[in-house]
Amino acid sequence: MKKESRMENKTFQLFPIGKLKVEGGCTTVHIMSEYRPALQHLEFFSHVIVFMKPNGKNTFPHCPEDLQRVVEESLQLMVQLRNNEVDVIVAKVLKVNMKKGIVELDYGATEDDTVVFDLKPYFPCEDRVKDVKAPNFMKQWPEWRFDVNKDCKEVENTKDIFMNIQLEDKHLLHPIGKVKKINGECFLQLKNLNTDFFKTIKEFSHIKILWWFDRFDKSNFRKVTQGNPPYENAPRTGIFATRSPVRPNPIAMTTARILDIDVKNREIKVSELDAFDKTSVVEVIPYIPALDRVNKYDVPKWLKHWPEWLDDREGGFNRGEIEMVDGDIQAIKKYLEAEKEEAEEIINLFQKEENSKIHSNEIIVRGARQNNLKNVSCTIPKNKITVVTGVSGSGKSSLAFDTIYAESQRRFMDSITASRGAFYGQMAKSDFDQITGLPPAVAIEQKNVGRNPRSTVGTLTDIYDYLRLLFSKIGTRHCPDCGRGVTPLKTAEIVKLLELLKPGTIFSIKPFDGKEALDEFIALPQESPDRNLYRKRLKDTVEAALALGNGGIIVTIDETEGFLFQTREMCYHCKKIFFQLSSSTFSFNNPDSMCPVCRGLGIQLEIDTDLIVSKPEASILDGASNWWGDLRKFRKKPNANWMKGEILALAEVMKVNLELPWEALPEDFKHQAIYGSDGKEVKFTYENTNGRKGEIVRPVEGAYNIILRLFKENSGDTATRLTTAFMREQTCTACNGERLAPEGRLVTIGKTRFPETTGMTIEGLKEWIKDLPKNLAKEELELSIEIIKELYKRLDGLVEAGVSYLSLDRPVPTLSGGELQRLRLTAQLNSNITSILYVLDEPSTGLHPKDHRRLIKMLQHIRDEGNTVLVVEHDADTMLAADKIIDIGPGAGLHGGTIIAEGTPEEMIQNLHTETGKYLAGINDTKDASKRSRKKPYGWIEVRGARCNNLKSIDAAFPLGVFTCITGVSGSGKSSLVSKTLYPALAKYLGSSDDIPGEHDTIEGLEMVDKVISISQKPIGRTPRSNPATYTGVFDHIRSLFTTTEEAQKRGFKQNRFSFNSKEGQCQACKGEGRKCIEMHFMPDLWVECSVCQGKRFNEETLEIVYNGKTIAGVLEMSIDEALDFFINDKKISIILQTLSDVGLGYIKLGQSALTLSGGEAQRIKLAKELCKTDTGKTIYLLDEPTTGLHFSDVKNLLSILQRITDSGNTVIVIEHNPQVMIHADWMIDLGPEGGDQGGTIIAEGTPEEVAEIENSYTGKVLKQILDGSI
C-alpha cells in the first residue's frame, strides 16, 4: 500500500513541443526545431488531436453561430470537470510544413501563444465512436464534428516564437487515479474525484481517458522523433503521425465506452483499455460527438484497410466459442489443377546423427578437504561416466559439487576480464591442494524447482519456442470474431494460384466490396501458346483490383462461388486488423498476446461461496462463516463494523432466527447476505461499551461484493489473505486455460490449433510432429523442415528420458525434483556442446526401475558426445553402467569423508568390505523382508470412482494400521490418487484444509482416522533464513539456553538477541544474511561472504556470549550429530536432534540454509518434526519418495522408523519405486500400465508376494526377481 501511495503522490512533467498562433483568422501549430522531424507523414491524416494548455477562449471562428454556442457550453463543462492543466481538442489538418515546423488547423484559439504538448493522428478505429449517447441538453447538438476548409496565409517569420517558452513554469500533471484490471475487466479507480464528477460523466456513453506511459518517461525515449510503426507496409514515420508511447511527452489517450459507474466507490468500469494494470490516470474527459466524432476522414494508404469505428465491446474480444472456418485459399483447391510435379520423398528426416568419440584423459583432485572431506585425492576419467556413491552425509556432494564443480565455476569467473576481477576475487575457494585437467562444468541438481507458474515443461525445454516459430511460419490464423481463415498472400502468389485453375474454368475478378467485376477469364492449359498474354492480363487485373479493394479481391468461379484473396493482415468480413503473425503472437508472457482475463496464467481467482460459509451445519452466530466470524460476540458488543452489522440488520428486517444453522435459513436471506439486497436499505443501530451510539442506514452490500471490492482495491498482504481465505483458482473462462489471447489461440496447422499442441503429452506431440510432413504442401515443408527436425529430436530425447507422459503446458512448480532434472538433462543433450563436465545429482530419482535403462542411455549419449559425466547416485543399475565408481564413507559427517573404495563396477562387486560392494553383489536384506509376516489392517479407507487427472474412475482401498506402498511408472497416477484425491479428502474431513479433492464418487472410512500428515519434498522455507534449527523449533530452545548464561543476564540479553532475524542480534552490514549480493546483470547474481561478520550472521556483541565454549554462530555450524553430543543433557533439545539423526540427517548443519537442502532432506526434516509431536495412534502419514538421496544402508534406518510408526497403530502410505521399500511393505497398490493417458488404472494390489505374480505389472516383475533371488 505504501508503494501505491507513493505512486499517487507522483507528478508527471509535460515538456512544451510548440505553440498555437492565431494569424489572419487561421490557427497554426508552430513546432520547436528539435521536434520537427516528428511531423513526417502527418499530412496524410485528415485530422489531428492536439494536447495543449487550457486558455479558456477556444472557439471556431469560421463555424455557424449555433455551433459557437456548442463550443462555449462544452468549454464550460470541460472547466467544471478539469483536474489537470491540459486540454485535448480534435482539429482538421489543413496543411503541414515539416521544414518550417508548421501545422495549419481549422480550430480557433483566440488566445495567442497557447503552449502545445503533443500531436496525435486521429485514428478512426481508436477515436471514432459508432453508437454514441450524450446528455439531454446536447440532444440538439450536431452528431458530427463541423470541419472548416479555409486557405491560410503562408506564415513567414517563426524565428522568435519560442523565445520565452523555456522560461515558463513547469507543466505538471497529478494522477487522479489508476487503472485496475481484474479478470479481463477494466476499471478506473478515481478516488481523488468528487461524486459530482461521476454524476456528470454518467450522462455520457463514452469518455476519453488520458493516462501516462510511465515506463517511457525517460530522457532517451523523450528525445525520439521518428520510428518504424508496427503497421503493415508503413514507412519510417514521425512520432506525431503515430500513437507510439515513445514521444516527447509519454501521455496517451484512449476512447472507451462506459460500462458501469460506481459513484459510492468512485470507480468507472470501461471497455478495453490498452494500459497496464496500475497505470496512472491523469484526466477523464467526456466524449462529445459535436467536437470529437469525425464524419469524413482520411488516413495514409498503409492504414486504409483499418476499421472505421472504435471497437468498444466489453473486454474488446468475443468470449464465446468460435467455430473456425477454412480460409478461401483452402476452399478453392477443389478447382485447382493437380500439380504434375510430385512432392519429394523425405528420406531419413528424423534420423539421428552419430558423433565420434573423443580421446580420454583425467581430472585429478589432490587433498580435497571441503566440509567433511579428509584430504581426499582421486581421478575422474574424462569422457567417461563416474558415479560417486556412499551413505547420506558421507561427502559425495562435497566432492562432486562443492569441490570439483565449484572450482570450475570459480576458474571461469576468474577468466573474465580484469575489470570485473575485484568482484570475482571474492568468491570463496574450495579447500583442496590441487585440481588439474578441470574442464568447464555444468551442474544439474534437483534443487530450485522454482515457483514461477509461467514456467512450463514447454518453456523449460524450448519446445514451446520451436512450436511458436513453427506456427508463425506455416500457421493459418482465424478471425476471433467470425472464425474465418485469414491468409495474406503476395500479389505474385495470388496470380500463381489462379494460374493453377483447371483449364476451362470461368472466373471473374473484382475488388472487395466492389459491385462490378474488372475482368472475366477462362483458365488456359499450361501448354497454351497464349499463356504469356493470359498471365500478363491476369496480373494486371489482380493488381488493379487489389488497389481498389484495399488489398482484397473476390474471385468468382462459374458465377456461383466467390473466394476472397488478400494481401493485408485483416478479416475483410469483420473489418478487424491484425499485426503480422510472429512467434510473439503465441507468447503468454507478452502483454499483447496473453489472455487479458487471466494474464497468461490459464487460471483466474473466483470467490467461492462455500468458503464464505464453510460450516453450513453451524449457525452464523457460532462461526459458520469465517467472513462474519463470531457474530454472537459482536451482537453483544456491537460497533460501527458494517460488514458484520449488515447481516444482523438484514436478519432483523426479514425476521430471521440466526440461532438456526445456516443451511436451515431461508434461501432469500442467504442470497441477500451473500450477494446484497439489490438497493433495499436496512438499518443497524449500535451502542458500544464506551456508550458511543450510532445508526447506519444502507443497502446490504453482501459478503461476495465486499470481498470482490476489497480484492480490487488492495494488493499485497490484504489481497493474499482474501485469496487464501475466500477464493479458489478456476480455469480461465475466457481462454479455457490456454493462456493466450484469441488471436494466438485460433492459429492452426491443418486442423490443429496452437494451444492443442501445447496441451499434448510429449509422446503425443512427437507422433503429431512425425506425421506432420506428410500433410504439408511443398512450400510449407521447405519453410518448416529444420524446425520440425529440431522439434522431433528434442521430443525424442524427452521420451528417452522417461518423461513422455508430461504435457507441455504442465507448470514447472508441479514437477518433482527428478522430473525437473531429467528435463534439464535432455536440454543439455540438445546443446551440441562438447568437452564439458556434467555433474548430476541422483538423476534416477522418481524413475520406476523399468525406466532406468533409458536414463542410462542418455548419460552414455552425453559421454559419447565427448563430455565427462560425474553422477552422485545410489541406484544399482546406474552404478553398474558406469565406467568408474567412487565410494565415500564409511559413515556420515565426521565419520565419513574418505574414499573407502574405487574402481570399475566389476572391481566394486569383488569388494565385499563395503555396503556398496555387498549391495551390487546381491548381498542385501530384501530376501529377509520377504520372510517376515505382513501386518493385518484394522480397517480400510475406500476411494470409489477416482477420476483426477488421468485416473480412469478407479476404486482403491487403503488399509489402516499398516505400511502401504504405491508404485507405478512415472505419470501413472500415483500422486493424483494419493496427493490430489485421498489427502485433500482426509484434510477437509478433519477440518485442516479447504482444498477440493480430485474428482471422485465417494470415500468411505474417513471416520476411522483423527489426523493426516502429508510430508512432501517441497522446501522447508523459501529464503536462506530458514534452516533445520528454525523449522523444527529446536533453535528456540537453544536461544533460551544462551539467555541463561551469566554474561547474557548481566547485559540483559533476551532470547530475541540470539536471532539473526532481529535487529538486536544480526550483523548490520549483511542484515543477518551472512553474505552479500553482487548484481551481475549479464549473469545470475553473485553472492559473497560478508566481510564484516565473516558469514557468522551475528554482530560482535552477540558473539561475545558463549555457552559451554560455543557462540550462537558456532552452534549453528555444528552438524546435528555434533549438536546431539553437545546438548546431550538438555532433554527438549536432544529429543528433536535424536529424531533428526534417526531419519538419517545427522550430517547436515543446524544452520544450513533451507535453499541448499535436497527435496529428500527437506522431507525427512518434516518427518522428524512430526515424529516429535504427540502420537494419536490413528494418524495417516503420507510420504512421496522418502528414499530420495538415501544410500542402501540409510534406507534400512528409514524403514525401521516407518515400521515404528505402524507399530503404534498408525498408517503409513508412501509413493516409492525403491525395491528395498517395496519388498518391506505390508500392502501394495500398483498403477499403470504406462504414464499419462496410458496410465490411471490399478494393475495390481495386495502383498508384495501377490503383486509379484501379476504378469503385466512392471513392479511385479521387479518383485518377482527379488523373491526369486535373481537380484
Image: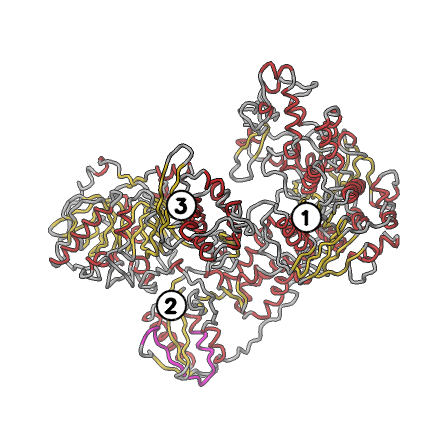
The amino acid marked with disc number 2 is Cys
Q: Nearer the viewer, residue 459 or 1153?
A: 1153
Q: Residues within 10 Å of mark 2 (few under 14, many from 20)?
A: few
Residue carrying label 3: 278
Residue carrying label 2: 574
Mark 2 element type: loop
The amino acid marked with disc number 1 is Gly
Q: Is residue 65 left or right of residue 880?
A: left
Mark 1 element type: helix
First in sequence: mark 3 vs mark 2:
3
Label 3 and label 1: CA atoms lie apart by: 39 Å
- The percent coordinates of residue 1155 (x first, y second) are 62, 37
Indicate whether 87 appears above or below 999: above
Residue 14 visible (yes or no): yes
Identify the residue at image location x=15%, y=47%.
Answer: 57
Label 3 and label 2: CA atoms lie apart by: 32 Å
The amino acid marked with disc number 3 is Lys
Identify the residue at image location x=67%, y=27%.
Answer: 1117
Question: Is label 1 in contact with label 2 (beta carbons under 8 Å)?
Answer: no
Q: Is 507 in the magenta?
A: yes
First in sequence: mark 3 vs mark 1:
3
- The percent coordinates of residue 134 (x first, y second) are 24, 58
The residues colored magenta run 495-514
Q: Residues within 10 Å of mark 3 (few under 14, many from 20)?
A: some
